[in-house]
Image: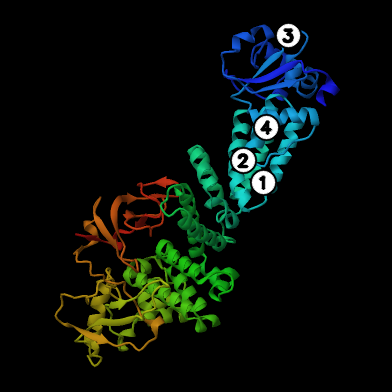
Amino acid sequence: MMNEQYGECNVIVTLGTQKVPAKRRLSQSKSPMNKIARGERCTSVSSNELEDQQEIKERTKWSCHTKVLYNESPYFAALFGENFIESKASLVYLPSSIIDSNAFDSIIYYMYKHEINTPKKVEELCSMYSASDYLGMNTLCNQLIESLYELVHKCLCYCNTCINNVPELFSFCRIRGIEFQDEKMAQMTQRVMTVLANDPEKTLSTYWTGRHMAKLLIQLPQDVSQALSQKILYRVNKSNAIESLYACFSASNILSTNDPLLSWSKPLHATLTSVQSKATLIIARHFDFFCCQYPALLSCIDGITYSFDFLEYLLLHILEDQMDSSNVGILYEGVACDLMSRHAVEYNHQVKHILNVAKVMILCYITRRIGDIRQNGGLDKLEKNVLKLLADDLDVRPKSLISSSHPLSSRGIFSFLIPSIPDLNLSTSTHTNGLSRHSSRSTTTSRRIIVPTNSNPSNSFAKKLKRFLKRFSSHHDTVPRLSNRYASASTVHTTSSSWSHVRLSSNKSFSGKMKQRRRFSTGAAQVSAPLVGMNRRVQLTRRPVLTVGTVMFIGRVNFSEGIWIGVELDRRVGKNDGSVNGHRYFTCSPNRGVFVRPEDVSVVV
C-alpha cells in the first residue's frame, strides 16, 4: 500500500553503532541547518560505501521514502536539503545510542499512518519521546506526553500500576528537564513530584513501599533524594500528623513483609523514620488538642477509625521518643483524664490495658526526673484537680510536684503550726508487661516510703520554729528529689540512722499505681550510666522488654540539647539507622539505631 501511494522506496534508514553526542532539541535551536553543517547531527553515507560496511554486524534497517521523511521530520528535511550531499544518499545512519530500534519502528509507523501504536510500558513511551524529540517531531512529542499522562492516570492515582510507573517516569523526566532543557519534561517532573510527596497520608503507604521507589532513591543524587524526603516532611503538620503516622505504621508493616532482610528497602525506611519522628513530635506538643478536639485519635480509642495496634504504636513512640520535662504534664492529663474517661474504654479491656501502661510509663518518667520537671515548671500548667490526681497516683503532696514560682508553693509563715505530711522518698518495685498486646498479666506493685521516726506533731512550738527556720535558711527543698534510678528494685537507703522504712499497702486501682520496668535475670551485672563508653554493651532501662545493644555514639546532637548516646540494637526495635533529620551520627541497619539519655542505659559486663 505504501508503494502504491509513494512509489518505490528510495532510502534505507538504519541504526549505526557509532556514538553521537546527544544535543539539544532541534525545536529549540535557532539554526538547524547550521548545526547539521557543523556535524552535530548523525552522518549519512552514499550507496558506494555500502560494500565497505558488509563486514560490520547486520543492523536493523527500514526502507522508507524520502518524501515521507522530509514532510514528517524537520531533521530529515534538513538532512535531505538541496545544498547537502546527503540529499543524494540512499543509506542514512541514526545513532543507536540515542534512538531505540523499537521506538524508531513506532515512529516510522506514525509517519505513514499518523497514528500512535501506543505501547503499554512507560519505558517504551519514553524511548519514543527521546527519538521523536531528536528528530524534531513536536506534534508526536505532544501526543506522547498525553499518552504518558494517561498511563500514570494524570499523576493523581495511588494504584499498583502507578506505584510501578510513576517512579520510573520521574527519573526520565528529571534527566530530560535538566540535561536537555526540555520545558515539557520539567513541567511533568513537578507533577510527578506532587503525587510522590504532597500527601504523606496516601503516598507513604503506597509509593514509598514499592521496589521501584527504592530503586529511584538509590539512582538519584543524594541531594535530590534528600530533597524529595524533605518535601514530604514539610507536608506533615498538625492537621495530618496522626494520618501521616498511620501511613508510617502501615508502610512499616508492608516493608517488614515484603523485605524482611532489608535487601532493597533501606532508603524507604530512612524516610519513614524521619516522618515518624516529626509526626510524633507534633502530636506530643499538642497532645491536649488531639485528646479533646481532633476526631482521629478519639475514634481510634472508640475502635472506629484505626486499629488498637496503631493506638499502641502511637503511644509507644510518643512516650519513648518525644516525652520530656516540658510536655510530660500534657501527656499525663491527656491519657489519665481525657482518653481514659471515654465511655468506650470501660468496655474494652485491650484499650484500657494500653492506656494504663501508657499512664504507668508517664508516672515512671515523672518519678525519675522530678527535679528537672520542677525546675522547668513542667507540671505548673496543670489544673488543681489534675495535679491532685497526679499526686495521688505518685503518693506525694501536690506541692512537691510544682516549681517554687507556682502560687500554690507558698504555704504561709505560720504553716509550721499545722502538722504536715512527712517528706517522701519513694521507691517502687513493679512488674509490668509494657505496651504489648501479646501479654495480659496483671501488674503488682509494692511501694515503700521513708519517713522520719522522730516526726512528732506534739513537739513544742519552739522546736518547730527552730527546725523551720533552719530548713528555710539552708534553702532546702520542701520535698527531697526522688530517686534518679527508679528502676532499682531495692528501697533507697539514707545515711541517717533516724529514718526507718515503713511499708505501705495501696488499695488503689491499676491506674493509680506506679510501675517499674522489669528486671530481667540475664546473668550479667549492670553498671551505672557514667561508666558508659564507646563499643560497650548496654541495656535500655526504659524499654518494657529486654533491649540490649552496642554504644556507637556519645556526644551532642542537633535534634535536642545535652549529651545523648547512640546505640545499635541487636534486634530491629529501634527508630533509625544512625541518622536523625538527615544528619548521620553513626551507621547501622534501619530500625536498629536509637538515641537515649545517659541515665536511660546501664552497662552490661
The correct choice, above or below, for 584 with respect to 481 in the image is: above
The answer to whether mark 4 and mark 2 are in CB contact below 8 A is no
**Kind of residue indicated by mark 3:** Phe
Q: Nearer the viewer, residue 443 or 150?
A: 150
Residue in the image at 75% along x and 32% along y: 140
Residue identified by numbered label 2: 169
Q: Separation of disc 3 and disc 1 at Cα?
A: 43 Å
Q: Separation of disc 4 and disc 2 at Cα?
A: 13 Å
The answer to whether mark 2 and mark 3 are in CB contact below 8 A is no
Q: Nearer the viewer, residue 58 or 200?
A: 58
**Kind of residue indicated by mark 1:** Val
Q: Nearer the viewer, residue 137 or 347?
A: 137
User: Of marks 2 and 3, which one's residue comes earlier in the chain?
Assistant: 3
**Kind of residue indicated by mark 4:** Met
Residue in the image at 52% along x and 60% along y: 250
Q: Separation of disc 2 and disc 3 at Cα?
A: 38 Å
User: Of marks 1 and 2, which one's residue comes earlier in the chain?
Assistant: 1
- Judged by depth in the image, the label closer to the viewer, 4 or 1, is 4
Expressed as whole percent of the image width and height from the top left, the position of residue 209 reads 52, 52
Label 1: element kind: loop
User: Local crowd at mark 4 within 10 Å, few (<14), some, or many (≥20)?
Assistant: many
Outermost residue to the bottom: 458
Label 3: element kind: loop
The answer to whether mark 1 and mark 2 are in CB contact below 8 A is yes
User: Of marks 3 and 1, which one's residue comes earlier in the chain?
Assistant: 3
Residue identified by numbered label 4: 128
Label 2: element kind: helix
